[in-house]
Amino acid sequence: MTQESDDVNEAIRGELSLLDPAVRSSRDHYQRLFDPEFVEVGSSGRRYTYDEMVAWLPDHAGSSTDGPTYEPSAITGVVLAPGLVHLTFETNFEGRRSRRSSIWRKRDEESGWRMYYHQGTPVPPDTP
């Protein structure tokens, strides 16, 4: 494996962790996966910051270990620059599909890979 593929795989592991209800419901687990400068543009168009996401995530859909979960598929990634990986993928949540894009950043070995940016776009029901 190359360093680039290792970096992409680390970002994918982080992304999959953030979709895991056990991680989403535990502030200690998910907080370390978000970059302090994190920003998300939600499907509603609303912008979320690190502090808003850290406060909001445990109560958001997909965060209960006994409820519905996000089903990811077709995850691919590319290294944009050293320490910067862009992932794209789809999720299905209770029959609702979304196309997603995340940027993961690694500033240093101690903090590791963290989600810097995320955007999810709903896919209309009849779209292949």
Image (spheres, rainbow, N blue to C red):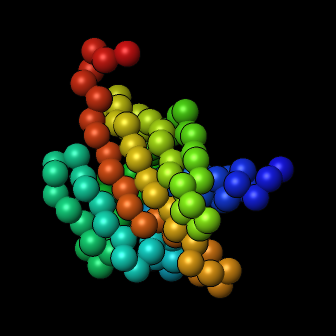
Q: Residue at x 48, y 39 (%)?
A: 89
Residue 50 or residue 86, whichever sits in front: 86
Query: Which residue sits furthest front?
Result: 81
Residue 22 or residue 118, whichever sits in front: 118
Query: Which residue sits furthest right?
Result: 1
Query: Which residue sits furthest bottom?
Result: 110
- Location of residue 30 in the rendering, given as x and y in whole percent from the top left corner: 48, 71
- Location of residue 15 in the rendering, given as x and y in whole percent from the top left corner: 53, 55
Q: Residue at x 40, y 80 (%)?
A: 36
Residue 74 figure quarter: top right
Q: Is residue 13 left or right of residue 127?
A: right
- Location of residue 11 in the rendering, given as x and y in whole percent from the top left corner: 59, 58
Please tell me whether residue 38 is drawn above or below residue 124 in the rendered image: below
Residue 53 or residue 76, whichever sits in front: 76
Q: Quadrant of the C terminus?
A: top left
Q: Residue at x 35, y 32 (%)?
A: 97
Tell me if residue 117 can be seen. yes
Tell me if residue 94 can be seen. no
